[in-house]
Image: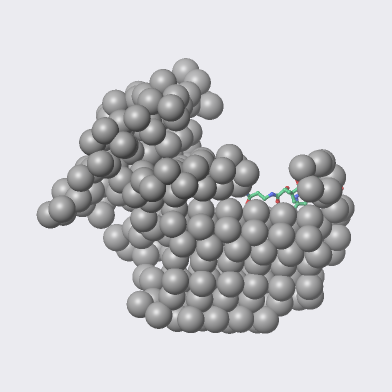
Amino acid sequence: MGAGDPGWVVLGAGGHARSVVDVLERAGHAVVAVSGADPTGDHGEPWHVDVLADDREAFELISARGLRAVVAIGANPARTGLVHELVARGLSVPPVVAATATVSARSVLGAGTVVLEHAHVGPSTRLGEAVIVNTGAVVEHDCRVGAGSHVAPGAVLLGGAAVGGGALVGSGARILPRVTVGSGATIGAGAVVTGHVADGQTVVGVPAVTRGTRRPGGTL
Ligand SMILES: CC(C)(COP(=O)(O)OP(=O)(O)OC[C@H]1O[C@@H](n2cnc3c(N)ncnc32)[C@H](O)[C@@H]1OP(=O)(O)O)[C@@H](O)C(=O)NCCC(=O)NCCS
């Protein structure tokens, strides 16, 4: 554990939480506990850190011991809501950057944002709160990614691309330079996005075409 690092609590106990715990430990941090039920149930390996019953217990432990928090839940709304709550309570939710990730000193990462192993964030890029830049993903120079979005493993945002809040850029997808993707949009795995994607829209394929539009809070 680095000097002055009080240790971390990871909110979440599913697959994404396993990746984030690994990122923290490989970067030399101590993970004190995870919280919540593992959605994989009996199939998950036992945790090597304490498992708290729920997020309330996690909030209490973080406050009582002055620990740092990271929310490691893949679902965008749940993750974003918990990060906002932690920030509102004045708790410490710094960005997390993996040891093998490269993040430009001239980029800005919001509270609760995580950059996983082998990912890259370029200069003059801004990531909002509670963003995931997942394993091997690339967010190039001059990009914008809104709060609560997820850039999945191996996805690429080329220079000047912009993604609104609460969006999913699926694994291996490419967003071409200066193309914009609306809030709550879903980019299918492997898609190549060549033109603007509206709020809530789902696109798939090469080049990407529309599959549907999600109303706020609704389904396709
Ligand atoms: C695009 C996506 C959201 C669609 O999900 P869905 O609505 O549940 O779609 P379904 O699986 O029911 O498939 C519906 C159709 O779309 C096609 N399809 C699904 N995903 C596709 C993709 N990424 N590219 C092209 N076609 C796709 C299916 O083959 C199917 O075609 P059909 O109607 O001709 O049979 C999803 O498949 C996807 O790509 N999600 C991203 C996953 C990801 O990267 N997650 C990150 C985890 S860390």
The answer to whether residue 110 is above or below residue 76 is below
Q: Is residue 182 left or right of residue 145?
A: right
Tell me if I can see residue 22 in this picture.
no
Q: Quadrant of the C terminus?
A: top right
**Residue 33 location, quadrant:** top left
- The image shows residue 108 at horizontal and vertical percentages of 44, 71
Q: Position of residue 206 (x, y in %)?
A: 77, 67
Work out whether residue 94 or residue 29 is closer to the camera in this orientation and state it: 94
Horizontal side of residue 215 vs 154, given as left or right: right
Q: Position of residue 185 (x, y in %)?
A: 74, 57
Q: Is residue 125 left or right of residue 60?
A: right
Residue 208 relative to residue 28: left or right:
right
- Check the image and tell me how it is coloured: one colour
Which is nearer the eye, 30 or 64?
Answer: 64
Q: Is residue 198 above or below residue 180?
A: above
Q: Is residue 38 visible?
A: yes
Say above or below: 151 vs 47. Answer: below
Residue 164 image position (x, y, % from top left): 67, 64
Q: Residue at x 46, y 62 (%)?
A: 110
